[in-house]
Each structure stands twice: as C-alpha cells, then as structure tokens.
Image: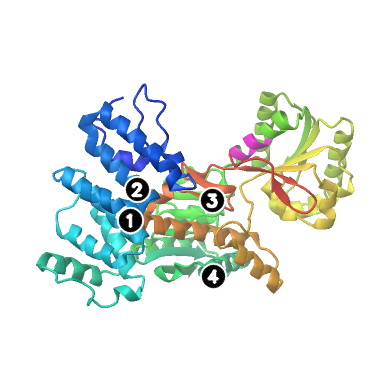
C-alpha cells in the first residue's frame, strides 16, 4: 500500500504507522508509546524510520515529521534540536506547520509556558494550516486562562509587531469557552423524589471536578410535566447548551424528541425503543441484547449450563424478553423449562420462588435460573427466593443489584452471575472521594444519584477533550471511549454503551470475572 496521497491528518488521527504490504515487521507505534521508558523504544523507532527513508525517499519529510511527533510524546527534551534540523532541511515543506505545532506541545510539556506562548504568537501571526489554528488557539488560551504567575501581565513578552499584537489582543479578549450542560429534572410532582436524587448527583460531581469552574450547569425543574420538560429542552438549546441530561423514563424522552440538535443524554433508558426515536438521543447504559448475549455466552461456554428456567414480568415487554430468551437458549443448546411469570408490583412471589427452586433441584450443577424481574420488584423477590433455598446458578442483569441485602444475599455466594453495565469502583476518577464521603456521612448509596454523578463526569471530560482537540462536543461524544463505572469502560457505539461486564457475587461484593465486552 503506497502512502502517497494519504493526508497527514489521517496519519495523525490514526496515531500509528500505516504499514505497507510486505512490511509487517514494522513496530506498531502504539506499543512504542506505551513503553515505560522512552529510551527503550526510541532507538527502535529511529531504526524503523531510517529503513522507511531508504525505501521511500520521496516521503522523507513525512518520516522526519513522524519522528518529531513521537519525540514530542516520548522525549520532548530531544525535540528542539530535531526541530531545528527539520526547519533547515525542509523550509518549504507542507508539513512545516505541523512540525512547529509539535515543538509548541513539547514546550508546554517541559513547563516552558512563556516560550510556548511566544512561539504560538509567531505561528498564528503567519498563515498556518487551517486545521491547526483552532488547536493552537485552544492551547494558548488554556495557558493564558490557567492563572499562571509567570504569564501575568505582558512585561515578559518581547516587542510585538502589528500582526503579533493583534493575535495577542484577540487571545486576551477571548475567554476560555464556558461549556453549558442543561439538566431537565422533575424536582416536584410525582417524580420529585427521583429528580431530587439526580440533582444531588450533579451537585456532588460539581463539588469535586477540578474543571467545574469552566462549566455552566443549568438545572430546570419540569415539575414532572412532560410538556414543561419539552419547553425547557427548546429553551436550553436556544441558550447554546452542549448537551441536555434527562431521566430515562419514556415520558421525558418523548418530551425531548425533535426539540433541537443538542445531544440528549440519558444515564439509563428503560425502554429500548427510545434510542431510534431521535438521532440526538444517547444512552449510557447498554442495550438489553448486549447484556443477554454476554450472559448466555458465559452460561454455555464457561459454566456449561444445559438446563434453565426463566422468570419474567407478565406484560408485553416480559413476553418479548421470554421469546428472546428462548431463541438464545436454542442457539446455545440450553433446554428451557416451563417459563415462570409474575405481575409487576407483586408483594408475594413465594409461589414463583418455590417453582424456580423445585425445578433447579431436579437437575445437577448444570442447571440455572434466569431471573429478569423489574428493579423495583427485586426487593421482594430476592429474600423470598433465598428463603426457598435455591440450588444451581442464578443468572440475571444489573437489576438484581437493586435488591441487595447482605443477609439475604448470603444464599447466593459464588452462584450468582450477572451481566451488568454498572460497576462503580474507587479506581475511577473522582469516585474514591465520592464513595468515602458517602460512607463517612452515613448516607445510603443511591444508584440514580451515582448514575448522574458518573454521566456528568463523562460529559465534562468530553467537553475538555472537545476543547483541546478543536472538535465539536457532539463529535467527541459520539466516539466516547473512557474508563467508567458504566461497565468498566463506556464505549459509545451508535449512541449506546457497547460494553457489558460479567460479575460474580462472592459473598461480600460483586467482582468482575471477565473483561468488558
């Protein structure tokens, strides 16, 4: 594959070598960047570049530029000398602006903020690559708005000509863009308890996020009225919000549909038909099909399950789920017994629990119960199922976590497997302090509060990525892929989280037994 004709932008986006046919021995750049010590990988990189220069001398300036790009990441101290050589060797290269950009980035990494600003003023005063200008301006604005004492005033600047003075004045007048996030929440009315819990999650996040001062959070109370929610969605978009966060209940999704172009983000979605209803809808929980596929994959391939019985709600969604369970069981060679159903909201499920346990006791360790009750019904089902003395595996989704009680859960040790898209951990950014404060204050863990906490954290990170990359908020959001309490890693594909995580109850907590998929 000839590299000629490929744009530099595509090379930089991919961030690894496009290896021509017959060159499969080329070291992957991503592995070089992941090396713990730059000195261990730099000689390999340079050796590979030398071979490429010999093989394709017409592309020599490109290979020199790529060396600069990786020096800026791995060894910024060595970049200045190489940049000077690039300027002398390729004074008319179309890649010269990119080389200067890598030099500026290295100055920032080395803590040479004054030199970086002066360098940036020189570049912006000239004609630069159009795609680089917003990146350079964003970098200089980030430095000038950071409140660094070494950049206070202007006495440290050299004399500026008219063009550089114009750039300097425009930068000083341009404030770091304040990102705006709208929250349409039912703080009063029938959904008031839910809305207030969600609002608490937003406030908890803003109290901890280091960039909270650069954000404008606009919370609106729709009073549990979808018509008011719809009007507020329109008004927030007229005010230029980057995104709107709403409860994942169908009535609020219907209210937000076709109100404008800003992304509408749902920390969770209860109805799988919502996402296709509007191209601006995003959901941070995974699709039910993804969770079912993960569950059946583990059941058949890892646990060797051969017989199973299911419990689902006795309503339309429950019947659709039952049909899908039957199809997946047939695909995996699992025999399903007589399905069990329950009426949502039931306070006595002992008959269903006894039937499940009776079925399970008729088989050996290769049997399982497939439990798919509504989250609110799990509080009733879990203790009554524990009282029936279940044998064999219990397979379910994250709704099983809603009814957690340590005493009742003792019966499920090492026999409860869930496919979940939600597993909070102190290892995720800002989560340790959040969980510690909850424990120290004696507050009970509220999942809906935590869902908003994590959703807003991701949206704020998304905004920072958009600002530093020069991309739009929506572009970054559409391809978001970050470590998260949403399944261990939130990876948006077609506007929904594409990761699910198999977890096992070990008697004290759920622990991951596989990687996110």
Labels 1 & 4 near each other (Cβ < 8 A): no
Image-quadrant location for residue 332: top right
Disc 2 versus disc 3: nearer the observer: 2
Screen quadrant of the C terminus = top right
- Sequence-first disc among 2 and 3: 2
In the image, what residue occupies the spot 70% across and 43% down? 418
Q: Nearer the viewer, residue 345 or 463?
A: 463
What is the C-alpha distance between the residues marked 3 and 1?
26 Å
What is the C-alpha distance between the residues marked 1 and 2?
8 Å
What is the C-alpha distance between the residues marked 2 and 3?
27 Å
What is the C-alpha distance between the residues marked 2 and 4?
41 Å
In percent of width and height, residue 88 lies at: 16, 47
The residue indicated by pointer 1 is 106
Please tell me the numbered disc located at residue 45.
none
Give the magenta range: 290-295
What is the C-alpha distance between the residues marked 1 and 4?
36 Å
Screen quadrant of the N terminus = top left
The residue indicated by pointer 4 is 203
């Amino acid at each position: 594959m000839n590299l000629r004709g490929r744009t530099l932008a595509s090379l930089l986006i991919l961030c690894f070598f496009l290896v021509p046919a017959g060159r499969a021995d080329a070291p992957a750049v991503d592995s070089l960047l992941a090396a713990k010590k730059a000195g261990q990988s730099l000689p390999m990189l340079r050796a590979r570049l030398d071979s490429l220069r010999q093989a394709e001398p017409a592309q020599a300036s490109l290979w020199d530029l790529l060396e600069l790009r990786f020096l800026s990441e791995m060894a910024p101290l060595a970049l200045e000398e190489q940049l000077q050589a690039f300027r002398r060797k390729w004074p008319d290269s179309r890649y010269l602006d990119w080389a200067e950009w890598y030099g500026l980035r290295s100055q920032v990494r080395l803590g040479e903020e004054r030199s970086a600003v002066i360098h940036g003023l020189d570049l912006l005063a000239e004609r630069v690559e159009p795609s680089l200008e917003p990146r350079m301006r964003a970098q200089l604005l980030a430095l000038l708005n950071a409140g660094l004492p070494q950049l206070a005033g202007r006495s440290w600047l050299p004399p500026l000509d008219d063009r550089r003075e114009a750039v300097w004045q425009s930068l000083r007048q341009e404030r770091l863009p304040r990102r705006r996030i709208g929250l349409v929440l039912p703080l009063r009315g029938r959904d008031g308890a839910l809305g207030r819990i969600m609002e608490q999650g937003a406030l908890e996040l803003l109290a901890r996020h280091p960039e909270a001062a650069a954000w404008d959070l606009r919370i609106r109370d729709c009073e549990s009225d979808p018509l008011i929610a719809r009007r507020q969605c329109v008004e927030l978009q007229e005010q230029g919000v980057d995104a709107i966060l709403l409860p994942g209940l169908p009535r609020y999704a219907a209210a937000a549909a076709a109100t404008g172009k800003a992304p509408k983000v749902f920390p969770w979605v209860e109805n799988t038909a919502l996402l296709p209803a509007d191209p601006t809808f995003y959901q941070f929980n995974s699709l039910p099909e993804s969770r079912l596929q993960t569950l059946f994959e583990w059941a058949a391939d890892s646990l060797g399950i051969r017989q199973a019985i299911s419990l689902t709600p006795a309503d339309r969604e429950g019947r659709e789920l039952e049909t899908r369970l039957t199809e997946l069981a047939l695909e995996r060679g699992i025999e399903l017994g007589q399905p069990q159903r329950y009426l949502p909201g039931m306070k006595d499920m002992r008959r269903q629990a006894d039937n499940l346990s009776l079925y399970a006791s008729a088989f050996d360790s290769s049997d399982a119960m497939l439990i798919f009750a509504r989250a609110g019904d799990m509080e009733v089902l879990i203790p009554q199922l524990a009282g029936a003395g279940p044998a064999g595996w219990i397979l379910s989704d994250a709704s099983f976590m809603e009814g957690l009680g340590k005493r009742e859960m003792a019966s499920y040790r090492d026999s409860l497997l869930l496919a979940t898209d939600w597993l909070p951990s102190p290892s995720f950014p800002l989560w340790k302090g959040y969980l510690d404060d909850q424990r120290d204050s004696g507050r009970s863990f509220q999942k809906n509060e935590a869902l908003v906490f994590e959703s807003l954290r991701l949206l704020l990170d998304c905004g920072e990525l958009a600002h530093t990359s020069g991309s739009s908020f929506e572009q970054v959001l559409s391809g978001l892929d970050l470590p998260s309490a949403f399944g261990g890693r939130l990876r948006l594909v077609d506007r929904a989280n594409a990761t699910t995580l198999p977890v096992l109850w070990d008697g004290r907590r759920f622990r991951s037994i596989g990687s996110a998929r």
